[in-house]
Image: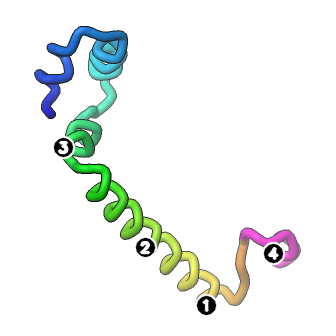
Amino acid sequence: MTTRDILEMPSERNNTFQAAADFGIDVSQLEYLLTLTPLERLIQHDRALELVLAVREAGIRYYGFDPRLPEASERL
């Protein structure tokens, strides 16, 4: 689905999409995501989550603590 397809759809969403584009928001990522199937979006989400968890774990190993825990604020 392209921007043109979205803009040709008569709906409130169309107006919101156009307003976002007019405001300067880059809608290309949204366009790309609309081309994916729900399964492809879930796979992409899982890969991104795996990356975040790996980076978080690497930070904990490097710094020796998890900054999300309350006792971590005592170390900073």
Q: Residues within 10 Å of mark 1 (few under 14, many from 20)?
A: few
Q: How many marks?
A: 4
Label 4 secondary element:
helix
Disc 1 + disc 2, Cβ < 8 Å: no
Residue type at numbered disc 4: Ala
Give the residue at x 43% y 73%: 51
Which quadrant of the structure image shows residue 50? bottom left
Which quadrant of the structure image shows residue 22? top left
Disc 4 + disc 3, Cβ < 8 Å: no
Looking at the rendered image, the quarter that the N terminus falls into is: top left
Q: Earlier in the sequence, mark 3 or mark 2?
A: 3
Query: Is 70 placed above or below 45 here?
Result: below
Q: Earlier in the sequence, mark 4 or mark 3?
A: 3
From which residue to which does the magenta span run? Answer: 68-76
Q: Which mark is residue 51?
A: 2
What residue sits right under mark 3 in the picture? Answer: 35
Residue type at numbered disc 1: Arg
